[in-house]
Amino acid sequence: MTAMTQNAAVRIAAFVVALAVAFGLAFGIGRVVDPWGDDAPAPQPGTHQHSE
C-alpha cells in the first residue's frame, strides 16, 4: 500500500468508528431516557376508532 492509500484507509476506518460511537451513544442515551417507557399512560381512544 502506498502512503496515500494507507492514509485514506485510516481515515475511512476512523470515520466508521466515529459513526459507530455516535450511534452507540445516541442509543445508550435513548435507553436511559426511555421515551417510550411502559409506565406511560395509554392514549384515549380517538373518534377514528370503532368497536364492533
Image (cartoon, rainbow, N blue to C red):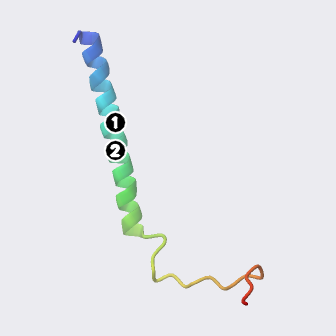
What residue sits right under mark 2 in the picture? 20
Secondary structure at badge 2 equals helix
Name the outermost residue toward the bottom. 52
The image quadrant that residue 43 belongs to is bottom right
Screen quadrant of the N terminus: top left
**Amino acid type, label 2:** Ala
Q: Is residue 48 above or below residue 26?
A: below
**Amino acid type, label 1:** Val
Q: On the rendered structure, is 18 left or right of 38?
A: left
Are the residues tagged 1 and 2 within 8 Å (C-beta)?
yes
Q: Is residue 33 above or below residue 5?
A: below
Which residue is drawn at the image coordinates 41% and 68% (left, top)?
Answer: 33
The image quadrant that residue 44 belongs to is bottom right
What residue sits right under mark 1 in the picture? 16
Screen quadrant of the C terminus: bottom right
Name the outermost residue toward the front. 52
Out of 32 and 38, give the one closest to the viewer.
38
Q: Is residue 39 above or below residue 13?
A: below
Which residue is drawn at the image coordinates 43% and 70% (left, top)?
Answer: 34
Q: Position of residue 31 (x, y in %)?
A: 38, 66
Mark 1 and mark 2: span between their CA atoms? 6 Å
Secondary structure at badge 1 equals helix
Which residue is drawn at the image coordinates 30% and 32% (left, top)?
Answer: 14
Which residue is drawn at the image coordinates 73% and 82% (left, top)?
Answer: 49
Number of other residues with Cα within 10 Å of mark 1, as a class: few under 14, some 14 to 19, many 20 or more? few
The image quadrant that residue 30 belongs to is bottom left
Number of other residues with Cα within 10 Å of mark 2, as a class: few under 14, some 14 to 19, many 20 or more? few
